[in-house]
Image (cartoon, grey):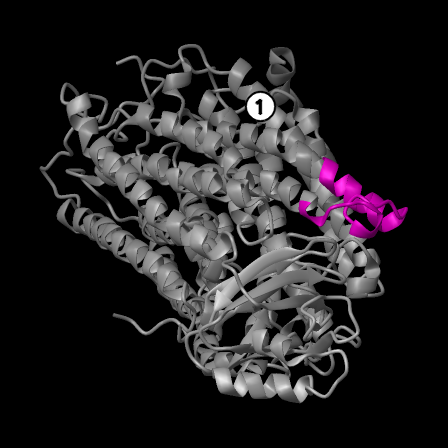
Amino acid sequence: MSSSAAAHPAHENQLSFVRQYIFSLDHKVIGKQYLFLGMFMALAGGLLAYLLRWQLAWPESAVPGMSWIPEPTMFQGIIPPEFYNAIVTMHGTIMVFFVAMPILLGAFGNFLVPLMVGAPDMAFPRLNMMSFWTIFTAAMIMLASFFVPGGAASAGWTGYPPLSADAVYTGVNWGITLWILGLALEFASFLMGGINFLTTVVSMRAPGLKMMRLPLMVWMQIVAAVIFMLSVGPLIAGAVLLLLDRTVGTSFYAVQKGGDPLLWQHLFWFFGHPEVYVVLLPGIGAVLEVLPVFSRKPIFGYKAIVYSTIAAGFLSFIVWAHHMFVSGMDFDLVMPFSITTILISVPFTIILLAMIATLWKGAIRLATPMLFALGTLMVFIVGGLTGIFLGSASADIYLHDTYFVVAHFHYTLISAVFFGGFTAMYYWFPKMFGRLMNETWGKIHFALTLVCFNLVFIPLFKAGLGGEMRRLYNPFEYDFLKPHQGLHQFATIAAILLMIAQLPFLVNFFWSMFKGKVADRNPWQANTLEWAAPSPPPHGNFDTAPSVYHGPYVYSAPERKEDWQPQHQPH
Amino acid sequence: MFDWFPQNISTFGGDIDSVFWLIFYIVGAGFILGEAVIIYCAIRYRRKAGRRAAFITGEKMSELAWVMVPAAIVLILDFGIEFAGGEAWSKVKGETPASDIKVIVTGKQFNWNFTYPGPDGTFGTDDDLLLENELHVPVRKVVDITIKSEDVLHSFFVPVMRLKQDAIPGRSIPAWFEATATGQYEIGCAELCGYGHYTMRGFLFVHTAEDYAKWIQERWPPAAPSADSTNVVQL
């Protein structure tokens, strides 16, 4: 490994364009590839969100600007019910598996893990390249599935059989088969990625970088990788069974021949719940890095955070059936799962309070990364607290599969993916691209995003409490839901504004990449090792291999004049 | 305090609603405290020239107590919520109380079919009655329902009853409710079941005892050879 890393700088100028930017072995280039793939897929997922929001506000009317989509997908801009189900299915699938995971784990994990542990690259650069091109293929399969006869998968992102197991129920044949294949490839990609992250952290840390001196972002990435690798196996098995049911007519999930539809739900959620933490933890990790730097204070309770994260990761494996309280599963299993679910609030209370305590008596600078970090906390609190309602089995009888659930998981996932992702983006942009992003536009982006996001999802909590079910093509077929149309129109206008509010970011991002103020190595005066490398770091990362002498968060130590102490500086 | 839910007309709906409100006040307090402290810190501890941040690592037990004590309180509240919630859960989803009124609910893309056993009280006989998307019950009587599906998953959802139960092909899942008010209410499907999911709407008719008896009379006229009047009254 070290010999190939040493050879990197000499090779750099000789590499062809293709080897340097397309089939690159450099973890930083691969990280950026994940980033751009994730951003591109976010456009696709966002377009789907626009379509479904429009349908919910003004059902069966032409969606502005969408009349170019041909029949039978849409009819002069009007969404038919079959396509609506495909929209909600693919919006969820794309956002979770092709936006959240590529950006938070693929992009930031790849870019940061080797830099933060002081390594020249990932442990397995070729495997790293392969994991990117595997998810790229998976993403293309997902997008292609919109164009096959019958359209894309329409059985919900959870793909419950029998609906997903036989084309007679949905009219979608190839769409769901491609959906399973795309997901299987995506899982394979992140399995390879997870192995790489773990091996890199275990075997390539700089001298002196003990596990308990790792930046918390690295802890979050490896806990996420472990959770993912341990949970995905059952789902891959489940997906293969589903594929066999669809293609060769086996009967793992069809009752007529002895199968059981509930089997899928157990396998899916055994993965599905830990998966929430897989995307949540790296987002929280970004916030954990930003809070000490912009408060000039050590993170409060480093060890308590690490142990709580591991505890939450462990608990995430024994809560899956809280998605199934009213599924008809064993009555006696419900309360144990309800209790484990609600117990997750304890480690997350510790993590959240440790984050808030980090602010206490700090010297806080509200730069854009810090604003997004605080925004993540404020939004995540709502997501976490509303989860208690759903974790309580009896309250869940009423709330299950209503818009309350939709609002709840958008608060948890958007806090981690969107706010956490932007925290990471604004904070590490100078390291990734060697230039600073514009602060004023960053703050405008933050303010608009925070306001619009809440305006989209607060009305959906209210719709859910009013009993509105999810995934209804036209909810106003129900008399008791007719009064909800105003809520949906409000949410839709806010959603359109939220999308427009991302334009300042996109302009800022691309403008700063080429025209932004040139950043020095350490524009935020942060301690962790990535800031010891040049901005952007060359192939091979560090000019001299760093050694580590401190924990990552020694800020404002009384015996020092400066209020920071880089990990690689002895005194 | 807030008028967020649909009307409740079931005997156990109030139990579910009070679990909701119990959680609401607990997490509401947590929400206000959490957000307030974040905003307070962000304003109060803004960076100023000449003031240095305090060096607090939170590794000492005396410091960590600020996190651990609230976490312990959360743990206690968690068990309180689960204790209250567990009772409501057993009441709603536990043993069905004894009942004379039995109905089989069958989900089928995209209808709710309701099967009544008829005067003989037995399903699968000639006097069974199948109604599409109409469930007729008397007020103040326990209704024993069995939920089935013919094709894919559905979820039998009666918002005013606070009752929701998935229907699974190949399974007969028991459920029950007792209505406390007469009237006509909507029944929905809460599990994505295909392109017509949004049209899978039924109606619940809760009758007074007299109206229900009249409804039974119309459906199964006493003159019919297989029925005898005592069974009708039982029904």
Q: Is residue A322 left or right of residue A389?
A: right
Q: Is residue B102 left or right of residue B51?
A: right
Q: Can residue A417 be seen in this view?
A: yes
Which residue shows up at 48% across the image and 76% down it?
A488
Residue A101 x, y percent position in the rendering: 57, 43
Check the image and report above or below for A423 versus A53: above
Q: Mark 1 points at which residue?
A: A121
Residue A461 x, y percent position in the rendering: 41, 65
Question: What is the secondary structure assignment of the residue under circle 1?
Answer: loop
Residue A448 x, y percent position in the rendering: 37, 64
Q: As rendered, which of B131 and B112 lies closer to the eye?
A: B131
* Residue extending farthest left: B50
Residue A386 x, y percent position in the rendering: 38, 54
The chain under label 1 reads A
Q: Can residue A355 be seen in this view?
A: no
Q: What stretch is highlighted in magenta?
A: A237-262
Numbered circles on residues, count = 1
Main SS of residues in magenta: helix
Residue type pointed to by label 1: Asp
Quarter where residue A326 is shown:
bottom right
Q: As rendered, which of A570 and B40 lies closer to the eye?
A: B40
Check the image and report above or below for B3 versus A351: below
